[in-house]
Image (cartoon, rainbow, N blue to C red):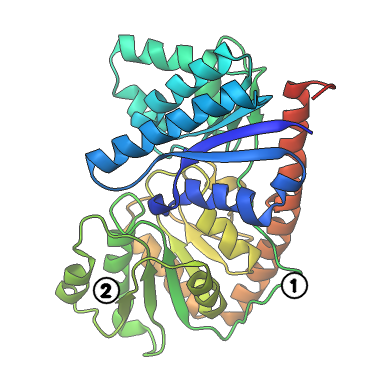
């Protein structure tokens, strides 16, 4: 059986990367197909806590490389410090002759790379070039990441994936508008509040916006009050799995008007439950959402966002049609079964026939 060492964030990060990892550890059954060991190397908190997490994780990784000799080291990568940490792990893995996979998640990787000086960009290119395989979240990333490599041969498109229920449980009579993600500027949460204010007088009293996710700026409740949306909008903080399921079950539409993304797990989770999504055509999102499965609006266009919300909320029949298309696409393109079959093929290709 192939031995895989996987490294990424710990559960405290509560973001899309952790959702991917959590699927591997719980829902996907990956540990039944490979000898999987997961070691977190990044956490949320103080500088001391972050440093301690990496030091402890790096020690465990070195021990695993020495004692277990994994065939494949699968590294979940975003941008900034994540690249520096994973570069150290990748160097150690190559020393012990393990194959290295870089699984690229960073929504802001492209803009971060552009902000670097020439020497730092060269280091990033070297980090990518030395990997044995690079997993990207959609075709959108092929041109950019491929442009940093000598050859695109090692690139593989591997869409994020979710557990898809056996049946579409969407209810067109639902009334809630759902936002699930980091409640801040990058995900378009503040634009969404402005859009809700513009259509507040046109919405029935039972249409409510519920916001789930961390709010790093700590200002979301004040913004809600300032816009006079106390009766229309509720901020609920972070949602655990049970709360997420309840939120999707009550949602009429899922809204994520992001400026930068990879391929958001919350969109795929919503589609898997038949919830139409209103989002933006950034990164790989259009490979999941289009006018058949939801609606796309330009990032930062508050009026367009407001009209899209009003249109879908006012037409249960349209939402029902989009729901069926969204659910079907999730089953065909973004299921865990399909994802893990592709991942296993990559593991086998790298590990060779004798692993």
Choose mark 1 or mark 2, whichever is in front. Answer: 1
Q: Residues within 10 Å of mark 1 (few under 14, many from 20)?
A: few
**Residue 167 marker:** 1
Q: In this view, does 252 lie above or below 260?
A: below
Residue at image point 28% right, 73% down = 198
Which quadrant of the figure contains the N terminus? Answer: top right
Is 225 on the left or on the right of 173, as rendered?
left
Q: In which quarter of the image is residue 95?
A: top right
Residue 128 picture location, percent across and down: 51, 18
Q: Distance between the residues labelled 1 and 2?
A: 35 Å
Q: Nearer the viewer, residue 26 or 204?
A: 26
Q: Is residue 321 above or below residue 344?
A: below
Q: In which quarter of the image is residue 320?
A: bottom right
Residue 157 picture location, percent across and down: 65, 34
Mark 1: secondary structure: loop
Give the residue at mark 2: 197
Residue 3 appearing in the image:
yes
Q: Which of 175 and 311 is in front in this view?
A: 175
Q: Which of 318 and 10 is in front in this view?
A: 10
Q: How many numbered marks appear?
A: 2
Q: Which of the marked residues, 1 or 2, is nearer the chain's N terminus? A: 1
Residue at image point 18% right, 63% down = 219
Residue 205 picture location, percent across and down: 36, 90
Q: In this view, does 174 lie above or below 183?
A: below
Which quadrant of the figure contains the C terminus? Answer: top right
Q: Residues within 10 Å of mark 2 (few under 14, many from 20)?
A: some
């Amino acid at each position: 059986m192939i031995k895989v060492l996987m490294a990424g964030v710990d559960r405290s990060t509560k973001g899309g990367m952790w959702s991917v990892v959590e699927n591997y550890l719980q829902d996907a059954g990956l540990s039944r197909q490979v000898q999987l060991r997961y070691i977190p190397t990044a956490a949320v908190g103080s500088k001391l806590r972050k440093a301690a997490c990496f030091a402890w994780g790096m020690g465990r990784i070195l021990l695993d490389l020495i004692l277990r000799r994994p065939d494949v080291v699968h590294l979940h990568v975003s941008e900034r410090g994540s690249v520096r940490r994973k570069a150290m792990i990748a160097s150690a893995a190559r020393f012990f002759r393990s194959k290295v996979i870089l699984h690229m998640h960073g929504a802001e990787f492209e803009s971060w790379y552009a902000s670097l000086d020439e020497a730092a960009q060269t280091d990033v290119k070297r980090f990518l070039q030395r990997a044995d395989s690079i997993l990207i979240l959609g075709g959108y990333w092929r041109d950019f990441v491929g442009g940093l490599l000598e050859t695109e041969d090692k690139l593989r498109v591997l869409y994020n994936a979710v557990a898809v229920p056996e049946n579409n449980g969407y209810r067109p009579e639902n009334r809630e508008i759902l936002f699930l993600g980091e409640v801040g500027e990058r995900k378009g949460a503040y634009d969404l509040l402005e859009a809700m204010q513009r259509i507040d007088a046109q919405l029935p009293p039972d249409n409510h916006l519920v916001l789930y996710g961390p709010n790093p700026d700590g200002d979301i409740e004040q913004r809600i009050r300032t816009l006079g949306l106390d009766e229309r909008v509720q901020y609920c903080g972070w949602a655990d799995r049970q709360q997420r399921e309840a939120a999707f079950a009550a949602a009429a539409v899922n809204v994520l008007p992001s400026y930068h993304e990879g391929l958001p797990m919350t969109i795929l989770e919503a589609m898997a439950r038949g919830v139409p999504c209103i989002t933006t055509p950034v990164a790989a999102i259009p490979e999941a959402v289009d006018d058949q499965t939801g609606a796309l609006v330009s990032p930062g266009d508050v009026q367009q966002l407001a009209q899209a919300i009003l249109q879908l909320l006012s037409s249960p029949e349209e939402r029902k049609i989009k729901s069926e298309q969204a659910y079907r696409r999730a089953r065909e393109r973004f299921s865990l079964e399909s994802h893990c079959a592709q991942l296993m093929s990559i593991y086998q290709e790298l590990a060779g026939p004798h692993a």
